[in-house]
Amino acid sequence: MKFTVTAGHGGRDPGAVAADGTTEAAIVTELRDIVAGKLRGLGHAVRTDGGLLTNLPLVHALTLVPGADLAIELHCNASESRAARGVEVVSLHAQVEQARTIARKIAHVLETPVRGAGGWIDQRQSARGRLGFVRLGGLVVECFFLSNPEELAKYEARKWRVATSIVEAITGGGAA
Ligand SMILES: [Zn+2]
C-alpha cells in the first residue's frame, strides 16, 4: 500500500510543550520516523513530511495526502487539566472504523481510554474546526496527552510498541 505519515506542527511551530520542555513536534517526528521505518520494512511505500528528524510545516504535509491509500498525521493532545488522558483520531465519517481501530490499538498499549465516539472524533464536532489534512481524507491521530506527566512517561517507555500498534492498525495486521 501507499502510505503518507506526517508529523504534526514542524517548521517553527513546536506544538504543545510538556512541563519538562519536551515538544510535541519532536515527539511526533520521532514517532513518524519509527512508523515509516516499520511500514517500509513490511514493503509498503511511505511518504513523510521530511527526512529523518526533519518536520516540514503543515502546508507541505497537505500536499502528501492526495494519492495515498491512507494518510495519517501524528499529534499529541494537550489540556489545561493535567489529568486529561486518552487517545482520539479525527477523520471524516467515511473513515470512522479506521479511526477507531487506530485509537483502540494505541489506547491498549498505553493503558488509557479512547475518547470521543469509541476513539473517533467527527471533525464537524471538533473544537479544532476544520482541519485541512482531514478534509483531504487524512486521519489526525492524537496519540496521548503530552500535558499529563504520567501519560508522557508511559509513552516514552512504550513508543516502539505504540508505533507497532499504529502499523498494525493501518495495515490490518496483528490482533484487533
Ligand atoms: Zn498537535
Image: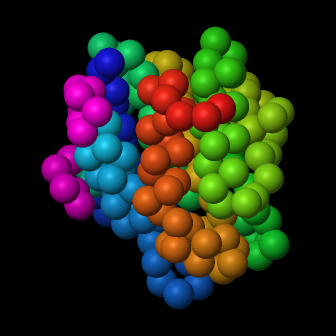
Could you tell me what secondary structure mostly forms the magenta stretch? loop
Q: Residue furthest bottom?
A: 20
Looking at the rendering, the stretch of residues picked out in magenta corresponds to: 40-54
Q: Is residue 153 left or right of residue 125?
A: left
136 is higher (above) or lower (below) than 151: above
Q: Nearer the viewer, residue 14 or 142?
A: 142
Q: Position of residue 48 (x, y in %)?
A: 26, 39
Asked if residue 48 shows in the view, the reply is no
Above or below, 19 relative to 47:
below
Residue at left offset 69%, top offset 51%: 108
The percent position of residue 156, horizontal first and vertical second, equals: 50, 72
Which residue does the image show at 31% across and 37% down from the upper left?
Answer: 39
Q: In the figure, residue 67 lies in which quadrant?
A: top left
Indicate whether residue 22 is drawn in magenta.
Answer: no
Answer with the quarter of the image where residue 61 lies: top left
| Residue at 62 percent of width and 18 percent of height | 95
Q: Is residue 74 left or right of residue 1?
A: right
Asked if residue 68 lies left or right of residue 110, the reply is left
